[in-house]
Image: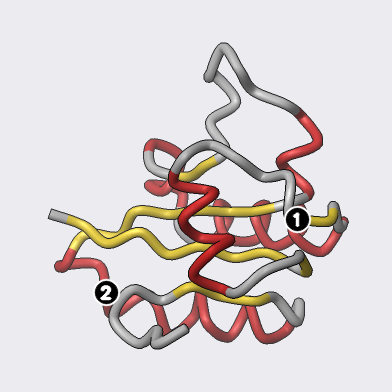
Amino acid sequence: MGLDYAFWKSGQGTVREIYEDLGDGISARLEPSSDVLEFREFLLDYWPDLEESIEPFESDPDFDPEDLKKYVVVNIHANDVAKMDRVWQLAEQYQLVAYDPLHTSQ
């Protein structure tokens, strides 16, 4: 079992509203940013195994390339949670908003 963590640069709405939209495949509230794309690239360099569980999925038939600049959602399994410290550091470096299902009250 895993947890979904989401990251984006800016958008309209609360963290929870944006996260719920992303769960429904909706990214319209979000603004594109090259920081999000760079974060995704660094994340995959650091943790190549995420390729199978990172969204947006480039293989999705409804894939919109612009979404690569809007958000990143990763599904992290319990045995990989220790790697999240580095992910948080990267997110802070890029000044991204994060949805953490274990620590979100918004």
- Which residue shows up at 39% across the image and 87% down it? 105
Q: Quadrant of the N terminus?
A: bottom left
Above-or-below relation of 14 to 36: below
Q: Depth check: give the residue in front, 46 or 58.
A: 58
Q: Dot 2 corresponds to which residue?
A: 81
Dot 2 lies on which element?
helix
Query: What kind of colouring is applied to the model shown?
Result: secondary structure
Residue 27: % across, % down:
67, 45
Distance, label 2 to label 1, CA atoms, is 26 Å
Q: Which mark is residue 103?
A: none
- Which residue shows up at 58% across the image and 85% down it? 89
Residue 51: % across, % down:
46, 40
Q: Which label lies toward us, 2 or 1?
A: 1
The residue under label 2 is which amino acid type? Val
Q: Residues within 10 Å of mark 1 (few under 14, many from 20)?
A: some
Above-or-below relation of 84 to 8: below
Dot 1 lies on which element?
strand
Residue 88: % across, % down:
52, 82
Q: Dot 1 corresponds to which residue?
A: 30
